[in-house]
Image (cartoon, rainbow, N blue to C red):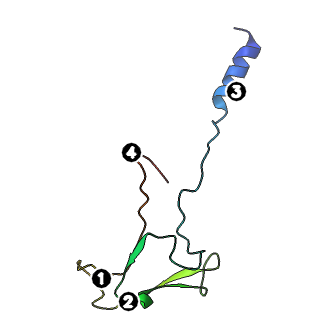
Amino acid sequence: MPKTTRTLLLLAALVPMASFASVVWKGDFETGNLSQYTGAQMVSADRLQVVSSPAHQGSYALKVTVHQGDDPMNASGNRNELFYDSHEAAGSEYF
């Protein structure tokens, strides 16, 4: 095999393959509300609030308040939760 062909093959092996990625879901509250999530489990609407200050990054953040006895789904412990159902195919990997 000629030296130039070997060099081209080596370079082709070392060049990383292009990756085509896109954002599947983002839960950053930049919509100004909870619409990025499928739902919430909280005992009162004031427990999970989207606020504009303080915000570490972007324009909005989530203010979470949990009081003793907050148990919206009769689970163990005090909690208020947001959730997102992605409906991704079984075996899919997302990071």
Give left or right: position of 59 versus 93: right
Give left or right: position of 65 versus 29: left
Mark 1 = which residue? 72
Mark 3 = which residue? 11
Which residue is located at x 48 percent, y 52 percent? 94
Where residue 60 sits in the image (x, y, percent)?
A: 60, 80
Contact between marks 3 and 2 (CB within 8 A): the answer is no
Where residue 77 sits in the image (x, y, percent)?
A: 26, 81
> Who is closer to the viewer here, 66 or 9?
66
Which residue is located at x 60 percent, y 48 percent? 21
- Badge 1 density bin: few <14, some 14–19, many ≥20, Cα 10 Å: some
Type of the residue with mark 1: Pro
Which residue is located at x 74 percent, y 13 percent? 3
Type of the residue with mark 3: Leu
Where residue 20 sits in the image (x, y, percent)?
A: 62, 44
Give the mark, 1 or 4, whose residue is nearer the N terminus: 1
Give the mark, 4 or 2, whose residue is nearer the N terminus: 2
Mark 4 = which residue? 91
Distance between the Cα atoms at labels 1 and 3? Answer: 58 Å
Instruction: Look at the numbered disc 4 and give the secondary structure of its residue.
Output: loop
